[in-house]
Amino acid sequence: MQIAANNPNRKSWLNVADNCDFPIQNIPFGVFITKDDIITIGTRIGEFAIDLGAFHQLGYFDGIPLTDDMFMQDSLNDFISDGRKTWRLVRNRIAEVFEAENASLRDNLKHREVIIFDVNEVEMLLPIQVGDYTDFYSSKEHATNVGLMFRGADNALMPNWLHLPIGYHGRSSSVVVSGTKIRRPYGQTLPNGETQPVFGPSKALDMELETAFITTDVNNLGEQISIDEAHDYIFGMVLLNDWSARDIQKWEYVPLGPFLGKSFASSMSPWIITMDALEPFKCDGPKQDVALLPYLQQKTAKNSYDIKLQAAIETENGDLNLLTTSNFNYLYWSMSQQLTHHTSNGCNVRAGDLMGSGTISGPTKNSYGSMLELTWGGKEPITLKDGSTRTFFNDGDNVIIRGYCKNDKVRIGFGKCTGKIMPPMKPKQK
Ligand code: MN
């Protein structure tokens, strides 16, 4: 089936600014609540949020097999579970109805009133009920940098790293939507030079500049999927800030890996950008250095996406301080390899599962995806516009991640993923 919704020449009767992340070619999916307290699945064109529950009820999806309440839900899980054919039909129809020449909704003011809202008048909610959250570690630059700092040059990249996409099981209950305030966590740490641990607020609260993909139902327990079909199970992508408390992480991670230094919060952007919308931005990933086992071998090198990424701190005086500029295409392991590896032991992956990329760092210092790397373990503080310095984040810092793709015809963006850091709670523990 053609992805007609991607036609770069299509214009909408809704006004869309030139540099907007959400032209009619994007058609992302999210969940929002209106001023009248109605929760619905929706999409976005320009600065307009479109209520797909109302759109469906008023007959604009006629002819597409959909349950009556498909979009009147507080999560996208059921829609995602319906599979790629449905996603394509729905995106194509939305593109058709909002095309400049199509008068059906354009000239029906009554319908427009109940379907179309100003994005500033709705509140975005977490778009999926996150079943399981897995976080990979797929940037070679990031893994090398962290290895250098935590273990030294001799074992910077562990011997398994080039043979399989390393990952761990994260915590789904604390995945929050962009804009949710992030409370500085408490934890147990071993201060430098000490022999006894202490308990208190983290002094090394960090971001991880990541993307994540969201799956449909992939496999039954005990079954594997093949690398050639993996891509068909991926619904779309979001920006992800996988918050990390480096001091807690450093003390707890041996031998089982990250735990409380990661599980206090992960922020995701509210609009899921479909793999269909990202299709024009497919590109080659990095050359993989060692011969892979057959189950991870891909037929083509074009397994990555050119997604420009950046992270910034907005300080309380309103200054925006750019921290880093990276790109999804630095990632060594592809999403298909990650997903294939994930099911290779028979572990079942379900609709609404979230798979983090791991921190996406580039080769140069201005492209590192965490403060840990940008300040090299806190040794090289960053000076902000107001003259203050940061090794890790301060309370009051608003951390903003952005991402977009752009070619000479169209810009497909993710919007932003933000989280402002709040002071720690008063502890209950003695
Ligand atoms: Mn991470």
Image: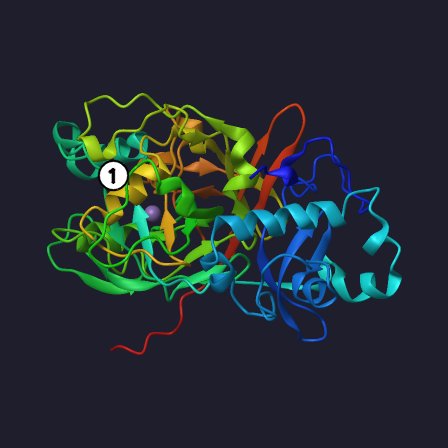
x then y, percent, for residue 207: 40, 47
Decide if residue 339 is on the left or right side of residue 128.
left
Residue 290: x percent and y percent? Answer: 19, 22
Residue 60, visible in the rendered structure? yes
Number of residue marks: 1
Residue at left offset 30%, top offset 54%: 219
Instruction: Reply above or below: 161 against 42.
Output: above
Query: Mark 1 packing: few (<14 Cα in 10 Å), some, or many (20+)?
Result: many
Regarding mark 1 in the picture, which secondary structure is present there?
Answer: loop
Q: Residue most toward the front?
A: 63
Indicate the position of residue 16 as horizontal and vertical percent values.
76, 42
Residue at image mark 1: 165
Q: Position of residue 117 (x, y in %)?
A: 75, 60
> Who's the residue at 75% across and 66% down the image?
58
Q: Quadrant of residue 200?
A: bottom left
Viewer-proximal residue among 403 and 313: 403
286, 347: nearer the viewer? 347
Q: Image check: 188 left or right of 37?
A: left
The residue carrying mark 1 has its beta carbon less than 8 Å from ligand 1: no
Which quarter of the rendered picture does the N terminus lie within? Answer: top right
Residue beneath the point at 34% across and 51% down: 204
204 left or right of 313?
A: left
Residue 322, quarter of the rendered image: top right
Residue 186, quarter of picture? bottom left
Judge whether residue 403 can be spotted in this image.
no
> Quadrant where the C terminus lies?
bottom left
Position of 156 with respect to 400 (left or right) is left
Answer above or below: position of 234 versus 421.
above
- In the image, 278 versus 300, the foreground residue is 300
Colour scheme in use: rainbow
| Disc 1 residue type (three-letter) | Pro
